[in-house]
Image (tube, rainbow, N blue to C red):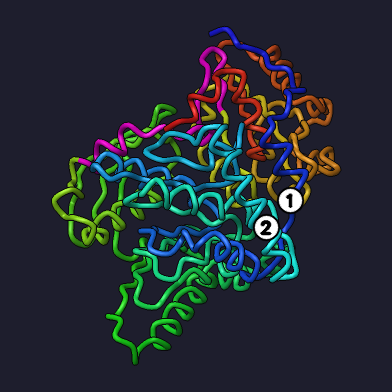
Amino acid sequence: MTINWVDQGQPRTAFEDALENNYSGGIKPGLKVITELLRQLGDPHLGLPVIHIAGTNGKGSVSAMLERCLREAGFRTGMYTSPHMISYNERFRVNGEMISDETLLALLEEIDRASVKTEEVAGKRPTIFEALTAMAFLWFSREKVEALVLETGMGGRFDATNVIPSPLLTIITSVSMDHEAFLGDTLAKIAGEKAGIIKAGVPLITASENPEAFDVIRREFDAVQSGAASSALPPALFVRVGEVCTWETASLGLSGQTVDLKTPTRSYGSIHLPMPGQYQCANLACVALAWELLSVLGPERLTEEALRKGLSSLRWPCRLEQVQEKPAVVLDGSHNPDGLRQLAVWLSQHKPNYEQIILVMGMVEDKDRLSAARQLDGLVSRVIITKPLTARAGNWQELAKGFQGISQDKVEFIEDCHQALKTAVGFAGENDLVLCTGSFYLVGELRKNWADRELFSI
């Protein structure tokens, strides 16, 4: 395959300029501003049929699987995810199709007008993420989606998506250390923030395996449900994936895997999932359980056949995605220590298939970069440290300190990520693997070398 080498200095879009020049990045804890902004817009979020998903790793994959299956079942779906890899359009999808540039700009103009009033009332202007979330609710409401898969941005309790008063279902995937500066410096604190999406009378599925994190989620769920015990709400169901589901990987490769899955009520047998990585099995189990619990939407539509077809046809870029053969090039957006730990398990399994493994890696400064790098230390033959395309890259060269198990003459720095990739491919022979990982800002940018933005429609 011929690689279409991309110029790193791509022009910004009119939407990017308008959004990023008029709204601030960063985090402002609390829901006061987003609540007022939505009020100014007529509360478009109220009444939306939402499946709300939080977690440290896996929430994007669960969102993509579930949306694709619901679409296969005939529902008009919406999906809101973050971050994007190539364009903001990726965050907003109806029936798998990204929002148009024209609609994005038109929505932003409405948000701009509402933000003036919001600042007068709430005393603060919305952040970028609050503006985007309000745009999403406005668009999905107008598009009359029948099922909205809504992924939190960072935490849960004070995340802008957490204005939904009563979702159909909540899901908390795995919980691990990440975003400590915003969510807390212990696993218990982080789990507490994720558990903030729990609502009275709403079922919860969690894939959390860490005892400390799980205990926090369980306590929060019980507290929320008991607090509403006197209301007319029926008791909500709590499901822990690892306690009620079993799975076994029958075949595993870069093209995906076949998983034998059992839930408390069904034995699915072999399910084809075109996503490699055994850690995806827990995400698959989350989706199967959600499928069974969502039968209230219409059991005649939520068939096992629709689930299977949806999963087998899923495309979800930059999750252990092989974009080239000979040499093999794999893109993976593992961006925190736990994600890199799971990637290291996959790499250990597949390492014997390659003569050498060349790593291209870059991470943002608010991640625990050294712990992340140590997960891959000793598993790779050569490392090229590069800079993600974001102001959050900071001292991007610091990542190299995590690689102490490799000769330092095999570690180099190339700031331009496309040049870093080109250099790695130049080093590689036909039987080698070039693994590109770290920030989504990095792997999404590198993905441009193989596909235009249309491939990001799922």
Seen at 67% across and 64% down, the residue is 118
**Taking 118 as reference, is 341 above or below it?**
above
Per the rendering, the mark at residue 245 is none
Seen at 45% across and 45% down, the residue is 61
Query: Which of the 4 image quadrants contains residue 32?
Result: bottom right
Q: Where is residue 205 in the image (x, y as percent from the top left)?
A: 37, 64
Q: Position of residue 356 (x, y in %)?
A: 62, 22
Disc 1 residue type?
Tyr
Q: Do the residues labelled 2 and 1 touch (CB within 8 Å)?
A: yes
In the image, the segment drawn in magenta is 306-330
Is 77 colored magenta in this rendering? no
Please report whichever mark, 2 or 1, sits nearer to the chain's N-terminal start: 1
**Taking 4 as reference, is 176 above or below it?**
below
The residue sitting at the bottom extreme is 230
Q: In which quarter of the image is the C terminus?
A: top left
Residue 437 seen in the current view:
yes
Callout 2: SS: helix
Residue 404 seen in the current view:
no
Q: Which is more foreground, mark 2 or mark 1?
A: 2
Crowding near the residue tagged with mark 2, few <14, some 14–19, many ≥20 C-alpha atoms within 10 Å: many
Disc 2 residue type?
Ser
CA distance for labels 2 and 1: 10 Å
Seen at 35% across and 71% down, the residue is 202
| Residue located beneath label 1 in the image | 23
Left/right of residue 301 with respect to residue 65 in the rendered view: left
Q: Which of the two residues, 125 or 308, is positioned nearer the viewer here?
A: 125
Q: Where is residue 450 in the image (x, y as percent from the top left)?
A: 56, 18
Q: Which of the two residues, 166 or 204, is positioned nearer the viewer here?
A: 166
| Residue located beneath label 2 in the image | 115
